[in-house]
Amino acid sequence: MRVAGLLGANTLIVCVGLGVLPWLGAARSWRQLVARCGLAYLCGLVVTGILAAHLALVHVSFGWLALALAAAVSVVSGAWHLRGTERPVWTRPRWPAIGAAAALAAVLAEYARAFAVAPLNRYDAWAIWALKGHALYAFGWADPTVFAGSEYRFANLDYPLLLPSLEALDFHAMGAFDTRLVHLQFLLLLVGALAALGTVLAGRVSALVLWLLLGAVALAPAVFDQLLTAYADLPLALVFAVGVAAAGRWLVTDERWSLAVATLCFAGALLLKNEGTLFVAAAFAGLFAATYRRWRPLAVAAAIDVLLLLPWKLYVRAHDLRDINYSLTDTFDVHHISGRLGVGPIAFRTLGREMLDPRQWGLLVPVFVVCLGFAAARGARPLALFGGVTVLLSWLGLSWIYVVSHFEYSSYLDSTKSRVVASVVLGAAVLIPLLASAVGPERPRDGAARAP
């Protein structure tokens, strides 16, 4: 029954996403809705998480009934938006794609055996994420007694609430605080991210390269290991990576829907973890550097993301919540950082080695670097500049965190290095197909439109 409840809630989340796609411009007809339905689950997850997290700040519980209402409103509004548009036409799928999808599904099904029974036995999973998710499930809102209480400072109270809100929704759906089955939500997030990546990149890149990328991400040891911890780092990386892929497509095609999807994913990244601000800022810096002449839509996208983050920042300011690990305001504390500047190069090299570790990430980063060089040499400089600036600034920003941190750097770096680089690695990896296609012959402007 608990599994049925969890799957039922996620089915409603898919409905939310399907209704959102027309408003994002990703589906301007029923035909396009079918072609791009792979975006539905991830977009629905982000929209639901943002809505639940914001309502929790104003004493409004988001449970089964609220989710069902949101799904109904989304589906009806999306259907109204598409009324009278072109209907989908059945075309026979190609056997290579069927085989690749079946192989990927088999891998994910094998993963599910571990995720369904995994214990919640990692410290941060208990002390930060599950604690807040349980509190939202029990109290129905972000009661300052817990979410701003001095007794709970160890729980990084300034971390945003998107992930705890989704966990609380799962507990409502399962009817219990089930610390084992909640892991399936993290696996479903991987499924949604892979489906979204396939949809965003379809029609612009080689099908072979795309399936190889999806397989490489799914099979990367770090992806499986880190998702199973129930930490927020890999969910952040997956949502951010889809945003980077959508932004890269926008650079190539200038399609508004892809920038809208990127904006939504970047908003999700901002509300998943504080480090999301660093990664999203790096991505926008890369976009502005790559295409400063198109600054107006980028400015609008950045403003939307800031507005979506604002309610949580007001809550943090109202209750004077501070990160016990680090504060970027310490960047301006000359006395604090004067004796720690040597930590920066050490952290930079250590994080670099972690990203290149084939036992964690395979060859994703080396292949990205090679494709980046070839794309820049072949004239695809905007896309190469976006990828290079985003990755480099993210890498430098992560390194700077260890400089401004109040923790002893060696133990802090050693305990976090393997997971904090996830967003950098996956953000780089998802650009590989676009960079590779820039080296090859020109592809159709919107090949996805030809798909059913």
Image (cartoon, grey):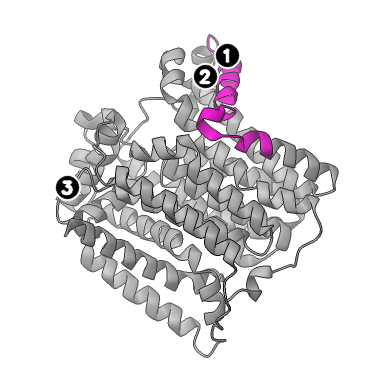
Q: Amino acid at mark 2?
A: Val
Residue shown at 54%/52% (left/top)?
A: 242
Q: Nearer the viewer, residue 115 or 259?
A: 115
Question: What quarter of the picture does the C terminus occupy?
Answer: bottom right
**Tags 2 and 1 touching, CB below 8 Å:** yes
In x, y percent, where is residue 358? Answer: 56, 29
Task: Answer with mark 3 or mark 1, whichever residue precedes in sequence.
Answer: 3
Callout 1: few (<14), some (14-19), or many (20+) C-alpha neighbours within 10 Å?
Answer: some
Callout 3: few (<14), some (14-19), or many (20+) C-alpha neighbours within 10 Å?
Answer: some
Between the C-alphas of marks 3 and 1, the distance is 44 Å
Task: Kindly indicate the quadrant of the structure image that contains residue 50.
Answer: bottom left
Task: Answer with mark 2 or mark 1, whichever residue precedes in sequence.
Answer: 1
Region rendered in magenta: 338-367
| Residue 129 seen in the current view | yes
Residue shown at 38%/66% (left/top)?
A: 14
Left or right, 145 with reference to 238? left
Residue matched to label 1: 341
Q: Which tag is nearer the camera, tag 3 or tag 2?
A: 3
Above or below for 233 versus 305: above
Q: Which mark is residue 177?
A: 3
Between the C-alphas of marks 2 and 1, the distance is 6 Å
Residue matched to label 2: 403
Left or right, 300 with reference to 78? right
In x, y percent, where is residue 322? Answer: 36, 31
In x, y percent, where is residue 81? Answer: 49, 82
Q: Which tag is nearer the camera, tag 3 or tag 1?
A: 3
Left or right, 133 with reference to 83? left
Residue shown at 77%/52% (left/top)?
A: 438
Question: What quarter of the picture does the N terminus occupy?
Answer: bottom left
Q: Secondary structure at mark 1?
A: loop
Q: Nearer the viewer, residue 250 or 4?
A: 4
